[in-house]
Structures are given as C-alpha cells and as structure tokens.
Image (cartoon, grey):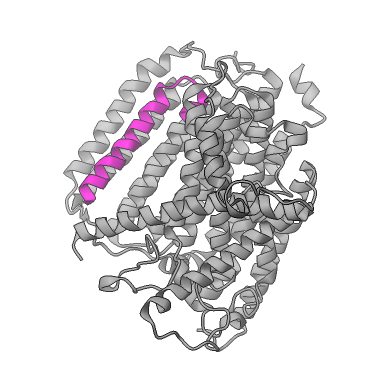
Amino acid sequence: MTILQFFLWSLLKIAVVTVVMLLGIAYTVLLERKLVGRIQNRWGPTRVGPFGLLQPLVDGAKSFLKEDIIPTGVYKPLYILAPILSLGCALISIGVVPFGEPNVGPGGMHLFQIADVNIGLLVILGITSIGVYGIALAGWSSNNKYSLLGSLRSSAQLVSYELALGLSLVGVVMRAGSLNLRVIVESQSSKGMATWNLFGGFQFVAFFIYLMAAYAETNRSPFDLPEAESELTGGYHTEYSSMKFAMFFMSEYGNMITVGCVATLLFLGGWTSPLGELIPAPQNIFVHALMPIFWFVLKVFSFLFLYVWVRGTLPRFRYDQLMNFGWRYLVPLAILNIVATSLWLAYQPLHR
Amino acid sequence: MIPLSWYLLLSATLFSLGVVGFLIKRNLITVFMSIELMLNGVNLSFVTFAHQWHLVKGQIFVFFVMVVAAAEAAVGLAIIIAVFRARSTLAVDRIDLMKL
Amino acid sequence: MHLILFIVFAGLCLAGAINLLLQTHPINSALSLVVVMSSLAVLYLLLGAEFLAAAQIIVYAGAIMVLFTFVVMLLNAGREEHTMGSGVARILGFPAVAVILGVIATVILKAQGLGSAALSDPITSTEDLSRVLFRELLLPFEVTSVLILIAILGAVALARPGGDERRVGK
C-alpha cells in the first residue's frame, strides 16, 4: 500500500467515524431525554418526527441559530479555546478504538479501526487527561465565581478519579499482557461471555471501580458536581451560550461514548459475540464483517443505557463525600484488585 | 533520517531557555515552571542517548525523572500555597524576609 | 516524513518554550509549557519510546501541569510585576547561559559516531521497558515509591492550614 493510499483510506475512515460519532452523540442525547422521561413517568420529546426521532436535528439547529454572547469580562483567547479543546479531546480518542475484526479491508488493512497503536489504552487515558484543561480553562477564563468553583471542583475530581480509573484497568492489562486494545479483546474472545474479563476474568471489582470512576470522569450524575445546577447555576459553562455551550454538551456525550467503548473493549469482550461459538459464523461476507459491529454497538448502547438509568435513579453526591469515596474506597480497592489479580496469575502455571 | 545531534541541540536549547526563564521570571509559579522546562530538556537528551546506544535504561531514567518531577511539583506547589497564604504575594522580590 | 514531523514538533516545542518566557500571565506560561510537553511526547515517539510518550502526556501534561494551572486558578495570581529584581542575574546570567549553550552545541556538533533516527527504527516495547525496570532496577523503583509517599506527606503537611500559621503570618 503506497503512502497516498494510506492517507486516502485514513481520511475516509476518519470522516466516517467522525460523522457516526457526531450522530451517536446527537442520538445519545435523545436516548437520555426519552429514557429519563420514561423513568419520571412522562413521554420525553415526541413532537418532531415519529417518536421525536428528529429532535436532535432541531436541537442542533437551535444551538446554531442562537446568539453567541461573549461577556465583556472574560479572558477571550482561553474562553474560545476551552470548548474547542474539550470537544477535540472527546472526539480524538475514538481514533484508537477497534470496532470490528482486524484485517478485513483490502490489502489486509484495519477497516474498522483508524489507527492500530501498541499503546492504545494509554493513548485514550492520555487524551482524557488533556481534556481536563477544557473544563479548567472554561471556568477560569469566564471570570465568574460559579464557573471558577465548578472548574476547580471538576479538575480536582478528574485528577483524583483518573487514578482509580487507571488502577482499575491494570488488572485487565495484566491478564492480556498488552496495552494494545485489539490484543486485549482477542485475549477474551475464545469462549464468548465466559471468557469476558468481567465474568471469566474475575475482574468484576475492577469493572465496578471503572464504572464509578467513569461516571466521575465524564461529570455525569451522580457525580455531576462541576455543573450542579442547584448550587452552581451550571458550573463551568455558566457563561457559555449557543454553539460554544453545545460544544461542551457534545463533548460530555462524546466522552460518555468513549468511556462506553473502553468498557466494552476491556471488560465486555469488544466486538466478539457474547455467545461465542454457539452461533455458527455467517457465510455471507458482508454479514460476517458487520456482525462484530452489531455486537460492539449493542454493548456500547447497553453501557449508555446504564448511564442514563443511573442518572434517573440516584441523587447527587456531596463534594466531600465524592472525594472520600474516591480516595478512601476506590483507590485502595483498585490496588487490592491488582494484588489479587497478580497473585492469581502467578499461581496459574498454565498461563504463559 | 535525522541526525541525532539535532535532537541533542533541541534538548540543549530547551534547557538553556529554562535557565533563562529561571533568571528573568519574577513569579514564583513561573520560576517553578522554568525548572520543569529544564527537566524536560534533559529528558529529551536521555531518550536520544537511549536511542543511540539501543539501551532501555536511558528511557527508564526518564521515567524516574518524571516520578521525581511529580513529587517535586506536589511539594513545591504546597510550599507556594503556604507562602501565598503567609505573604499573599507570589513575586519573588517581595518574599525577602530572610534577606539581610 | 520524519524530517517534516521533527521540524513541526521541534518548532512547536521551541515556540512554546519562548512563549513561556514572553508571557506575563502565569496561566499562559503554563499552557505554553503544556504545548512544549505534548510536542516532546511526539518527539519521544519519533525516537521509538512509545511508553514514555504516553507517560509524558499522562504524567506531565495531564497531572503535573493540571496541578500548576489548578494552583494558578486557586491563588488567582495576577500578572507578573516587572521589577526585574537582581541585576546580577541579568549581567552574569545571560552570558553564562550563552556560553553554556555554545559549549554544549560545539561538543554535540563535534561528537563522532552519533547515529541518526528514522521512522523505520525499532520501537522499544513496553514489555522490554518493564522487564528491565522490574528485574534489574527493582530497588530504585521501590525507593522512588517511598519518595512519592514522603512527598505526599510533605505536601499535605505544608498545605494544611496548621496551628503555627498565625506565627508565620503575623
């Protein structure tokens, strides 16, 4: 494959993934509104299109057409940079996620993954940690005490929970012996659900820690303190309007999708079928290529469903409770999980 | 193909810029940042030499430098907060109680 | 390809470092340092140190610099005052820095047998790195963990508003 072909294919993959991701973000918002509506015994959006399915389109148009207000007191360069940084980091990390089986494209290329990186997991963690700047700068440059409080809360929360998040993934990485996301998925693909890291790998403690830390990392309920409406009038995006606000909104949902993808890859067997070999492999080549995508999307969807379910169910934590929970319970638990997993691996003579 | 001396020159330049920052900046936090810049410059030459001699230990040295830098940042920023609490300024010229 | 990547990111690196010196507000300096660190991560990648590149982003750009911006925001430190304190630093410092840079540069340029880097060079895998780290250098690794622990304790003890604060303050 020449370098020109490589560039063209990469650009095509990037374009497709970006469009799908943005559509996914839009429909995750709709999913959330619908589900929370049902949980609260109302209908959610129903007016635009059948079952309100065109609602995201209208929402997008609305935020585009609103007036873009830049308050006079803000520090302008950073005020404008912050939402771009936020959305950029939310969209970039999808680039290393493998959606389907490798080597299915022409010339044995990865059709369902933009970049196959040896350290894919670390790339995702790194980009997530850069995303903190978006929120921190937004709050500081807004020149507003609620924004500043929200962003201080958020940076502290993100930095603290990143520790628990990273430590919870160590067990999985030790089991797979690699940081490459594709290898991690293949290590749990042999017998379907029974060899998922969540069940067969006995990583359910790690999954629980990951789940909690992921809610905190994406600023979602019950840990949505940085934008707690009842205390901070909206937190770090109080001063943002129109498209800039929409960018923060989209980055939140983009992060949710990324976190769902990582959970799927690391704990739920990625693109492999949960039934393992019980279903015979389909003969049709297109079905064969698209089945993994179906399973992947289904798993990410159920993760997002869980997200919304939790949001509709649990009340918000208090800030000191949040920090206590993170540092006093999650981090020691994650370390215990690492110790237990490594002991277990060491006593397995057949492993390696 | 890039000669490794370019990387080394870049690392030396970064280090010198760090020293210049350490000398001319008057804000405690920025002075501290210049130190981080110097550490980064040195790290680059460690990685370059690890590449030159195909030794992994050079990279591990960078890893240790990062760890020490993290510890240093934690303690240093705690000192800065304590100083700010006591003197309510960060200008290094005003923090001169110990001067004769 | 390697040349283009090197020029772009080395340029970004130098621009960030110079911007750090020119900016008067600490938060701008902090952000330009983040740019320096991120482009250094790309340079590490070019030199085949992929784990270090990730660690550079996660530890430096994602943790240490966040701490810096956090402190800048917390103290809400304003612009730097241009007092230009000690003249000694300017008179003796700049020539000294120039001399040091000149000496290092001549040594580097005179050095024989320095190799070159290309994109096709082998990449140091995380496995190799951890094998050396946890077999040969286990003791230093454990000692650094003790160092980190001491640093945490020190930071907590320093930043906590203690009983003797009144004595220091007034």
Q: How many marks?
A: 0
Q: Position of residue A138 (x, y in %)?
A: 57, 31
**Quick one: which residue is furthest to the right in this view?**
C163
> Which residue occupies 44% across, 62% down?
A119
Q: Position of residue A229 (x, y in %)?
A: 73, 36
Q: Residue A96, relative to residue C79: is it above or below?
A: below
Quarter of the image for residue C91 reads top left
**Quick one: which residue is furthest to the top in this view?**
C83
Q: Residue A156, relative to residue C69: is it above or below?
A: below
The magenta-colored residue range is: C1-29
Q: Position of residue C63 (x, y in %)?
A: 55, 44
Could you say which is closer to the camera, residue C154 or residue A50? A50
Q: Residue A226, relative to residue C20: is it above or below?
A: below
Q: From where the camera sits, is residue A39 visible?
A: yes
> Which residue occupies 38% across, 73% down?
A102
Could you say which is closer to the camera, residue C156 or residue A227? A227
- Overall secondary structure of the magenta section: helix
Could you say which is closer to the camera, residue C86 or residue A344? A344
> Which residue occupies 20% across, 55% down?
C115
Judge whether residue C67 is colored magenta.
Answer: no
Quarter of the image for residue A132 reads top right
In the picture, which quadrant includes the N terminus of chain A? bottom left
Left or right of A219, for residue B65: left
Judge whether residue C11 is colored magenta.
Answer: yes
Q: Position of residue C74 (x, y in %)?
A: 65, 28
Q: From where the camera sits, is residue C160 visible?
A: no
> Which residue occupies 53% across, 87% down?
A279
